[in-house]
Structures are given as structure tokens and as C-alpha cells.
């Protein structure tokens, strides 16, 4: 009996002993460098939408359908990434597969987000060739100077984006004194059939360049893009810590000969050409209680005026009435074509405010970060409010619950979106 | 009588700066004994919760001189590729998905838990602190340190130093008004080669995180020279290429 008790005690104590022995173990194998790496990310994201059946975009997208109340959507994502390194050369790739099961049916799309070869002859010079992202600019929600990137979603600015095929180099030089760092990044970006053909006008070889300075503890970038696929544009940005817990940043973009394509309420198209100026000013502030505030003002010089957007919504309503009375959807088809890459782009109007407040580990609950984000369209007074909770307790697993509430009157940007509310859960696992 | 008084004051005046100088020298020696001036190292950072649950991070770190330090996360997978850079009081975080370095502060923590960014990217103590006083407590010195600027993460430090080894055994991080923020315990002395024998484990707890503790374990600290260009924003995505 005693032996049994001893054995039972041993069984109970063994895990504790093992735990004690394992404390603070750091195996040398964890520090060995391998020439290759393979990893990835898998995500499951169900979403519930509460539609606004009287909104213009609901009519445009659902005029032939009746989902009958709330709609659900099930999204999955798989990203694979790998690299292989030999001497000063490195091969890197990242793929992305999106799967969606919604009211409209199933869809799947796979592509290479990035895939390039890097040559690093010295610590001062690196040359990249292939598909990659650049992510220029200092803004959190918007980047008017990101001339070489796809626009990011201010509701999820940290999502990975697809790059473009380009050849680029980074030359870095460090100094003593007020100018601590200088770097130069020239980029060649071709746009031909099947190469970057979504970027802009075809059969052009574009050039972009960025000069970076760390001067008097301030990050400064000077940026230029030219070549014909898009009109020539110039940019400047900066970022600086005023105090250890307060950072300020800004961007300014000057876009020459920008063409604004807009319609009147009857669908007649017009083009207005002008030099556009877009800019952004923002701060990031951390309080003693670990609350982070990100606040940005964005002026989109290429945006639509309130009247232009109102005409677009009026045209959709006209097309919808025409469909109801005649059964012809030709006007709605035309409106749908105008939506893509034009009226349908993210934040298509002129003046916006962004505020994000996140609280790290409230009530001493480690790995929990609640946040609330607001985007306010200053022109038509509509807005989105997004509360969320992120939990990262489990290694490599991120759990996020997020709601988006869209507020706005008729003819306003967020008031005419097809949904009033959205609730989504995201479970993402890194491997 | 006057002569005796003047002599005593002079002797005292002579001793006071010598005492302060000793404190600075002790601190300089502590820095030298903890790390070579320029080095590479591997570190594991462990956050331990009251119920024993852990979260672990592995980092490769490079440092040059008194004001340049950078680190890249090697594990876990969710953090791999993230890098942090510190140039003096400037600090940036690079997240591969975000794709560009963003400025962060020394008070934030990129990993959660008790360690903040200043603990993870710590510069030489003598670069950030002045010695206010030095006392002897048995086998240890007790140094009272005051931050040189308001940008330093902790306004004050109380550092207990082993007299023989001239290595810290415990550091209390305090506010300007002497409120305790956290305590660092230096443990498990290990020979890293090249004449470097130092604590391989730094454990911390905090009255602000009752029951929680965080630990840094060091491995493979090696003296190594780096170019200044390795400590730049443009180079942040490439820090891992410096591993051998």
C-alpha cells in the first residue's frame, strides 16, 4: 500500500519535477542558423453582416437577389512563405490563398504576394529583383506617398499586401553628427502585358526613387515616381519622437496632371485634370497606463467632392428605379463599372480623421488588447466605429473579435454602404 | 584650531569627488563585465504567468558602441522576422506584414509581460545614468543611479554589485519619486568564452504585475564588430542575414 502511495505521489510530482528541471532552458539548437526557412499563416474568419436594404450600394449589389436579412460569410486564408540563403544571395517567396463562402457562392483566389531574389554584396548595398512590396510612407491608416503599393485598408492597416514586380536597390551610409543615416532606394517598375498590368498604363518602364535621412533624430523621406503608367508624382514624409511617448508624423504628395473621372446624376461622364495635393498629419501617443492613441488627419487631393459622390448615388438610385420599372439593368451595370477602381476605392472622398485607442493588458490581463477605431468622413459627416478585442495568450495563435458600425445619412459615404453593421471573428495561426 | 578645521574640510573635499569617481568607475567596469562593447548574442525571453504558463521568444541581438543595438525575433513563428532597432533614444519596430519601421517608445513592450523595450534593447548603464552615491553593504556595493536625461526609461536605479566580480546581482528600477517599477535579478554565472563570465539569466518581477515574472536567458555572447550601416532603418529587414 505504501509503495502504491509513493508511486502515486511520484506520478503527481513528476510533471512538477520535470517543469522545475526545464525551467529556463535554452538549447543551442535554437540558435543554429539554417540556410532555409519555411513557415506560414492560416486563418479562419466568419463574418455576419446586417444589411441596409435602402442604401445605394445594397441596391447596386443585390438588385437581382434577396438574401432576406442578415448574411453570413466564411473566409479562410493560407499564406506560405519560405526563403533560401546562400552566401550573399537570398531567395524569398510568400503566397496567398483566399477562400470565401458567401451568399454569392464560393470563390478562391491564389497568388504570389512576393517572390524575389536579393543580393547583398555588402552591409551597405542590397539589390532585389522580383515581386515585392515597398510600403513607403509614415502614416498608419493612409499613405499618400506610397506610390508603388496597393492601397491598404484603414480598417486593417497591418494586413499583408500583394507586391509588384520590380528591380530595386538599397544603398545605406551612416555618419557621425546630426545626419546619422542616409539611404537611397532606386526602383524600376515595368508595366507590360501580364507584368504589373493592374498598376497603370501599359507598355511603360517606370522609375521611382526614395532618399532617406535620419537627421536631427527625425526620419525624412524624399520620394519621386515617373514613367507614364501613372502621372509623375513627388512625395515627402517625416516621423519624429517629440518625447519618448509622443511621436508625430506626416506625408505630403504632389500628383501632377491627375485625372478625376466623375459622372452627373444622369450618368454622363466628365474628366477634370488638375495637380492634386494629398497630405496626412498624425500622432502616436502612449500614456503611463499603456493606452495608445493613434490620431491622423488625411486630405485626399484625388478624392471626390460631396456633390460628385451624391451624383453617383443618385445615378445608382435612378438605375434601380429603371430596373424596377423596365427590368433593364443597363444603368446599374454602368454604375457597377464606375464603382470598380473609381467610386469604389477605399475612402474615396477628401477629408478624413482617424482615431484608434488601444489599451494593453487592462486589469493586468496579460496578452489582451481591447481597442476602438473610428474613421470620420469630415465632408459628409459619416463614420465607422470599430470596437475589437485581441487575445494572444497562446503561442502563434491570435484571436480577434471585431465589430464595425457604419453611421451616416443618405448620400453619405458610410451611410450608403450595403451594411449597417458587421461582426467578425478571426482566428489566425502562425507556423 | 583653524588649521585643523581647514585641513579636515580639505580632506573631506578631496574624498568626496574620489568617492563619486569610484562609483562611475565601478559602473563602467560593470558594463565591461556584462558585455563586450560590440557583440552578437542570442537571447530567450520567457514570460511566466502566476499559474506557470509560459510564452517564449528567441532573439538574435547585435550591439555596437554605446548607442546602437538591434534585435530580430527568430521564434515563435508569429513574431519571426520582427526586428527592433535603437539608436540612442530613437527606437523603431519593423513588422514584416506592415513592411516599414514604425517609431516606438522605450516604455512600450513588443512582447508583453514585465520587460519593456528598454529592457530588451538595453544600452550601457554608464551611457544612460550618473552615479549619485556608492555604499558598501557586506560583499556588495550599492550604487544609486540617476538618469542623465528624461528620455531614459527609468528615472532612478538602485544597483547591487558583487564586489569581487564587479557584476550586478540585483537592480531596482524606480520612478523619480522612488516608487518601485520592477526588480531585475542577475543569476547563473556562465563562461561565454573570450574571458567573458557573466550572469546568463536575468529574472524580473514587478509590483505592477503581481505573480507574473519575465526571464531573459543569454547564449553565445560573442565579441564582433559591425558596420554602422547594420544599425539603420533600411537594414532592419535584413538583420537576420548577419547570423553566421
Image (cartoon, grey):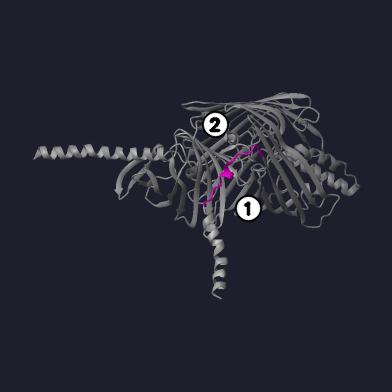
Give the quadrant of the N terminus of chain B.
top left
Q: Is residue A120 above or below residue B50?
A: above
State the CA–CA distance, disc 2 to disc 1.
Answer: 37 Å
Find numbered disc 2 in the image and state the secondary structure of the residue it sits on: helix
Q: Is residue B242 above or below residue B173?
A: above
Q: Chain of mark 1?
A: A
Tag on residue A388?
1
Q: Which residues are magenta?
A: A24-36
Disc 2 crowd rating (10 Å Cα; few below 14, some 14-19, many 20+) is many
Q: Where's residue B11, x and y in %?
A: 19, 38
Q: Nearer the viewer, residue A300 or B23?
A: B23
Q: Residue at x 53, y 32 (%)?
A: B231
Q: Which residue is mark 2?
A: B230
Q: Where's residue A223, x and y in %?
A: 62, 27
Q: Nearer the viewer, residue B52 or A26?
A: A26
Tag on residue A168?
none
Q: Residue at x 81, y 52 (%)?
A: A103
Overall secondary structure of the magenta section? loop
> Can you see residue A325?
yes
Q: Is residue B211 above or below residue A192?
A: below
Amino acid at each position: 500500500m505504501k509503495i502504491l502511495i509513493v508511486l502515486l505521489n511520484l506520478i503527481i510530482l513528476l510533471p512538477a519535477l520535470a517543469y522545475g528541471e526545464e525551467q529556463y532552458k535554452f538549447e543551442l539548437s535554437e540558435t543554429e542558423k539554417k540556410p532555409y526557412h519555411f513557415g506560414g499563416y492560416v486563418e479562419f474568419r466568419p463574418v455576419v453582416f446586417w444589411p441596409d436594404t435602402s442604401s445605394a450600394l445594397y441596391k447596386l449589389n443585390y438588385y437581382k437577389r434577396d438574401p432576406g436579412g442578415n448574411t453570413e460569410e466564411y473566409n479562410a486564408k493560407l499564406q506560405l512563405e519560405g526563403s533560401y540563403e546562400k552566401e550573399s544571395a537570398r531567395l524569398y517567396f510568400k503566397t496567398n490563398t483566399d477562400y470565401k463562402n458567401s451568399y454569392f457562392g464560393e470563390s478562391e483566389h491564389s497568388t504570389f504576394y512576393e517572390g524575389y531574389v536579393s543580393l547583398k554584396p555588402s552591409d551597405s548595398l542590397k539589390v532585389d529583383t522580383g515581386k515585392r512590396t515597398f510600403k513607403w510612407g509614415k502614416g498608419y491608416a493612409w499613405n499618400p506617398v506610397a506610390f508603388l503599393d496597393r492601397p491598404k485598408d484603414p480598417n486593417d492597416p497591418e494586413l499583408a499586401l500583394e507586391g509588384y514586380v520590380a528591380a530595386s536597390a538599397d544603398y545605406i551610409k551612416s555618419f557621425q553628427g546630426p545626419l546619422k543615416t542616409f539611404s537611397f532606394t532606386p526602383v524600376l517598375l515595368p508595366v507590360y502585358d501580364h507584368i504589373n498590368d493592374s498598376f497603370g498604363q501599359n507598355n511603360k518602364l517606370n522609375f521611382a526613387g526614395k532618399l532617406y535621412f535620419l537627421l536631427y533624430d527625425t526620419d525624412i523621406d524624399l520620394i519621386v515616381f515617373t514613367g507614364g503608367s501613372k502621372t509623375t508624382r513627388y512625395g515627402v514624409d517625416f516621423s519624429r519622437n517629440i518625447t519618448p511617448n509622443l511621436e508625430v508624423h506626416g506625408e505630403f504628395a504632389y500628383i501632377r496632371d491627375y485625372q478625376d473621372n466623375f459622372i452627373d446624376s444622369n450618368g454622363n461622364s466628365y474628366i477634370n485634370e488638375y495637380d492634386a495635393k494629398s497630405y496626412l498629419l498624425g500622432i502616436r501617443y502612449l500614456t503611463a497606463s499603456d493606452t495608445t492613441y493613434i490620431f491622423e488627419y488625411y486630405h485626399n487631393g484625388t478624392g471626390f467632392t460631396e456633390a460628385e459622390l451624391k451624383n453617383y448615388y443618385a445615378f445608382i438610385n435612378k438605375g434601380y428605379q429603371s430596373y424596377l420599372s423596365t427590368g433593364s439593368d443597363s444603368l446599374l451595370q454602368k454604375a457597377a463599372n464606375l464603382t470598380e477602381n473609381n467610386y469604389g476605392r477605399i475612402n474615396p472622398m477628401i477629408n478624413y480623421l482617424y482615431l484608434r485607442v488601444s489599451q494593453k493588458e487592462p486589469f493586468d490581463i496579460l496578452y489582451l488588447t481591447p481597442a476602438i477605431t473610428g474613421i470620420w468622413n469630415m465632408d459628409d459627416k459619416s463614420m465607422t466605429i470599430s470596437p475589437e478585442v485581441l487575445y494572444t495568450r497562446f503561442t502563434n495563435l491570435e484571436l480577434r473579435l471585431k465589430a464595425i458600425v457604419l453611421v451616416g445619412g443618405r448620400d453619405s459615404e458610410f451611410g450608403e454602404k450595403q451594411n449597417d453593421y458587421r461582426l467578425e471573428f478571426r482566428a489566425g495561426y502562425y507556423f | 584650531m583653524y588649521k585643523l578645521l581647514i585641513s579636515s574640510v580639505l580632506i573631506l573635499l578631496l574624498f568626496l569627488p574620489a568617492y563619486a569617481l569610484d562609483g562611475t568607475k565601478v559602473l563602467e567596469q560593470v558594463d565591461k563585465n556584462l558585455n563586450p562593447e560590440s557583440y552578437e548574442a542570442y537571447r530567450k525571453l520567457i514570460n511566466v504567468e502566476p499559474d506557470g504558463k509560459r510564452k517564449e521568444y528567441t532573439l538574435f541581438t547585435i550591439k555596437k558602441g554605446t548607442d546602437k543595438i538591434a534585435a530580430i525575433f527568430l521564434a515563435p513563428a508569429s513574431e519571426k522576422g520582427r526586428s527592433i532597432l535603437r539608436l540612442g533614444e530613437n527606437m523603431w519596430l519593423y513588422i514584416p506584414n506592415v513592411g516599414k519601421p514604425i517609431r516606438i517608445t522605450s516604455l512600450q513592450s513588443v512582447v508583453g509581460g514585465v520587460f519593456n523595450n528598454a529592457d530588451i534593447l538595453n544600452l550601457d548603464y554608464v551611457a544612460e545614468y550618473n552615479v549619485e552615491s556608492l555604499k558598501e553593504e557586506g560583499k556588495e556595493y550599492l550604487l544609486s543611479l540617476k538618469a542623465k536625461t528624461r528620455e531614459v526609461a527609468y528615472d532612478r536605479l538602485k544597483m547591487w554589485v558583487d564586489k569581487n566580480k564587479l557584476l550586478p546581482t540585483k537592480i531596482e528600477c524606480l520612478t523619480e519619486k522612488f516608487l518601485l517599477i520592477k526588480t531585475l535579478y542577475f543569476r547563473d554565472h556562465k563562461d561565454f568564452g573570450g574571458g567573458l563570465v557573466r550572469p546568463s539569466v536575468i529574472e524580473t518581477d514587478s509590483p505592477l504585475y503581481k505573480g507574473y515574472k519575465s526571464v531573459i536567458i543569454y547564449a553565445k555572447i560573442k565579441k564582433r564588430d559591425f558596420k554602422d550601416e547594420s544599425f539603420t532603418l533600411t537594414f532592419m529587414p535584413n538583420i537576420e542575414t548577419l547570423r553566421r
